[in-house]
Amino acid sequence: MFRKTIPIVRSVKVAQAFSGRHASTAASTVQPRICIVGAGPAGFYTAQYILKHLDNSSIDIVEKLPVPFGLVRFGVAPDHPEVKNVINTFTRTAENPRVRFLGNLSLGKDVTLEELRQRYHAVLLTYGAEQDNSLDIPNETLPNVLSAREFVAWYNGLPGFENLNPDLSGKSLTLLGQGNVAVDVARIVLSSVDELKKTDITEYALEILARSKIETVHLVGRRGPLQAAFTIKELREMLKLSTCATEWRADDFEHVEESVPNLPRPRKRITELMLKSMSEQQQGQHVPARARRFQPIFCRSPVNIIGREKVEAVEYVVNRVKDGRAVPTEQRETIATDLVCRSIGYRAVSVDKHINFDERKGCINNAGGRVLKRNLTGSDQTIDDIEDKYEPGLYTSGWLATGPTGVILTTMNSSFGVADLVCRDFKNNVIRMNGSRPGLELSGKPYVSWNGWKAIDTEEVRRGAAKGKPREKLTCVNTMLQIASNATM
Ligand code: FAD
Ligand code: NAP
């Protein structure tokens, strides 16, 4: 393990830090010391921005896992390697001499928020959304009912999920929810294993997928085609899958065609694509020899999971859509299935009792990234005094701040915005620079440094090369720690 000491730069004016639109007004002789909790896109993008706009600031990135990159490593689908190119930018940020990566340290377990706030001038909470929403319907805990989050964590090698062993011995999988996460899971299950084995998908997942008997995947949404949460690129990929035919239900598209001319452009394009695909299906143009089927189903809300020892079917209430909302009717439909994955959104949690957390929304109570005082929520906008309103020096960004929606680009933009606020707060003395801060006390903490991660990375790439894959991810934390501990300076 590598313990890098950051040179303490004294007699530096914070005002120097503000180039361009950050005009200088305040000065300090103390080096701004910042802790970012979570090494996902939000953490790296806020770090990148602060490094650029706040000269002489030093940043510690505290990450729960021994490895960085959050959902870029453990969420993004293995057959989307181009999306993971952001890792190159994150690596440049991590290798800046003013940054330390402190992996294998968890807020709420190894360190407390109070400790961080005492030891840094500013703390940014960017630890993402690690749980998922449940439907709260009967039998959700039956065997063969999983969440998409677990399924994704399994195929992507998140430590702790390697023994999930989803049962793919039945003929059909039902995905409840129609977001891009659900489409990712559908695509991975319906793709050819020959294609997947060239990716960084875990070897144990490949073995189970190779034996899969799943022929049909239902993608069930509570609203109609005009409200589908998946995006056009992801739908196109499904339509192009050589292993699978897409089958729409014509009844779901009643009155859809007549709405098309008035739709905003992105919605118009995706709706036209769905209608085109359905028309090809009706004319028998889709390739009949395809062994697998992808069946989007609209206007169905699951109300009951039916089964004794394991799931056998899902009962739905049939909805109609009024003003964009799902309105239940008296009608019900039951559709047989062998495996259910709910995919109705991830969920952030509070990991420390001092975090002002909105349990209902599943995010930290904040206004534009500034964390609100504990008695305040996002809707309390009446207090003018900044010190009465916000926790001094405490910020949040990414899915923990906004809730679990948005692609990496969305996270980048919101994180740059929060980082800009941090820089301004330093400049305007909203963040008090009353004395230097020591940073985290690391003695006795088995943290993984950036060099430790690089050793893990090298080993993963080596193991992958032997199988013709870009990497074979390590999934055992102890093995990771062992490899990291052998890393040289
Ligand atoms: P995260 O990426 O979750 O990062 C949070 C980090 O905090 C993690 O490293 C975590 O280990 C760490 N952490 C958690 N708890 C603690 C703790 N207590 N102490 C310290 N550290 C902690 N976007 C795209 O643009 N393209 C895609 O193809 C794409 N695919 C996706 C696939 C899936 C399955 C999902 C769920 C999302 C996908 N996204 C995609 C969206 C994208 O991943 C998010 O926008 C982005 O990752 C959010 O970044 P974040 O930093 O807020 O959270
Ligand atoms: P999402 O896009 O918000 O989709 C959630 C789905 O769950 C929606 O269909 C939603 O329906 C449904 N839902 C929510 N609550 C429900 C309930 N109680 N009952 C029934 N259905 C319910 O979330 P996600 O799929 O988890 O994705 C999260 C973010 O990551 C998104 O921004 C997504 O684009 C991004 N992502 C991107 C990619 C990619 O770029 N390839 C891949 C994965 C994820 P309603 O619309 O009716 O609410």
Image (spheres, rainbow, N blue to C red):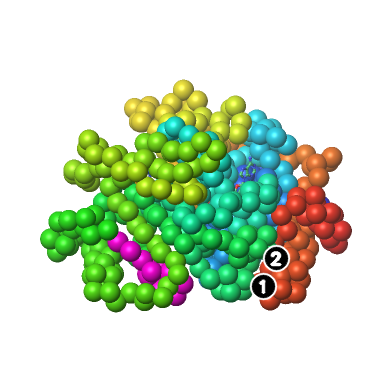
Amino acid type, residue under disc 2 in the picture: Glu
- Residue type indicated by callout 1: Lys
Q: Quadrant of residue 95?
A: bottom right
Q: Nearer the viewer, residue 304 or 84?
A: 304
Q: Which residue is mark 2?
A: 472
10 Å crowding of disc 2: few (<14), some (14-19), many (20+) = many
**Range shown magenta:** 236-248
Residue at 18% across / 43% down in the picture?
Answer: 322
x, y percent for residue 358? 46, 31
Q: Nearer the viewer, residue 10 or 335?
A: 335
**Image check: 365 left or right of 202?**
left
- Residue located beneath label 1 in the image: 469
11 versus 329 height, above or below = below
Residue 236 location (% of width, % of height): 37, 69
Q: Is residue 361 magenta?
A: no
Residue 351 visible in the picture: yes
